[in-house]
Amino acid sequence: MKPPDIVTGRYAYIGAYCCLYQVVTLDGSGSISEANRELGYQWTLVKQPGNSFLNGEKEVIATFVPIVVGEYVIGLTVHDGLANSDREEKIITVVDGNIAPVANAGPPQNVATGTRVMLDGSSSTDVNNDTLTYRWSLSRPTGSAAELDNSAAVRPAFVVDSAGEYVASLIVNDGKLDSVVAMVSITAYVENVPPVANAGTAQSVTTGTLVRLDGSGSTDANGDPLTYKWSLAKPSGSSADLNNHQDARPTFTPDIPGKYIASLIVNDGKVESTSVSAEVTVTRSNAAPVASAGRAIEQEIDTVVILDGSASTDADGDSLQFAWTLTTPAGSQAKLSDATAVKPSFNADAVGDYVAQLQVTDAYGALSAKDQVNIRIVKFPPLTGHLIFLKEGVHHVFKTPAVST
């Protein structure tokens, strides 16, 4: 049978020191029985310099009052009904006069930067029950400018402004003696801030164009490396997809017109950002139309010149709008009948060179290059049976002379 174990000496005074004529409290409540049986207690004053006596010598807590300065040897034996423990002894030193107080700077702390830390010296003690004064100091990590708000307070505070270890030191004084310095460590860490995703700017492109998204503007306040997670919402019927969902700058090729929404979430290894998106507006790929102002013309004065832009084309088959301009020779007052018609006309009212320019626009606003046709207006001599030589590729119009009867 294993005898019970004793835990003694839980005295009322730190360091097993006490003063003359002050009550000393002895506490054996930490003693245990392996079989969890109820214990009996026997306290004894094994050795003492005077004639003090124990109160409650058979109780879990006993007391005595020292009446002579010196060493007192306290013994405790416990019994669980089956076996006695060995006697455990403790020494209490009794002095006559002041005993230095004992500082207690409180428990260590772990906090995030920016936290207001409250120190606590209220557990500091003085055997003589003297009133204590407090003197705190603070050592800081490199780069910190933290200061205690009141170094003489029982519970001063400071704000941790940098990551690292802060050490608060406390000395208490009972009006006569300083305590030994007590220290407490405060470890400050940088609290993680969620990263901020940036999916780049909106884009407008045509079908078949390679679109490059850009999440490189995403940031993390703690400087942590980021990982990227993209997703793509596309119009119905599209089979477009991102080439690398985890790249900072993925690409895709839109295959049909519509709105594509690229969403981005970044992660700093601890938390994800809020999702952000960039819109890509896609229109149909459109080729510019080609204007054709027709063949060169040579006509006689006082005839109607008909221009012809009907040979203008658009590779996409879009409808075209026409815009003609006319440059006339000196003395002419000629005006186009309709500058937006496919085949406008004008009256050739003066001999000389006319130039008609044509530019066409398709249904998507694409402009063609300008094309021009040269018109030469001449005055032919009356028909007399002589030969007239015509230029190949030039449209000729003759005015038929009136025949008298």
Image (cartoon, rainbow, N blue to C red):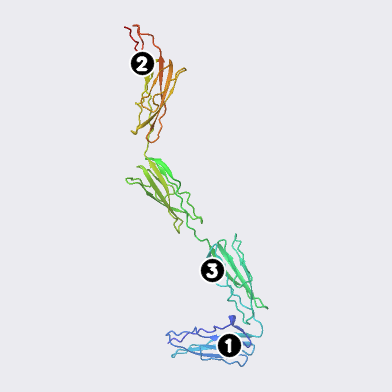
Camera-near label (1 vs 2) is 2
Q: Amino acid at mark 2?
A: His
Q: Amino acid at mark 1?
A: Val
Tell me, for residue 73, which label it has, or none: 1
Q: Secondary structure at mark 3?
A: strand
* Disc marking residue 396: 2
Which one is nearer the viewer's eye here, 167 or 401? 401
Of badges 1 and 3, nearer the viewer stands 3
Q: Residues within 10 Å of mark 2 (few under 14, many from 20)?
A: some
Q: Residue at x 61, y 75 (%)?
A: 103
For the residue marked with disc 3, what is the amino acid? Answer: Gln
Q: CA distance from mark 3 to mark 2?
A: 104 Å
Residue 243 can be seen, yes or no: no
Count how many numbered circles sit on residues in the image. Answer: 3
Residue 330: where, in percent of width, then height? 47, 17
- Secondary structure beneath disc 1? strand
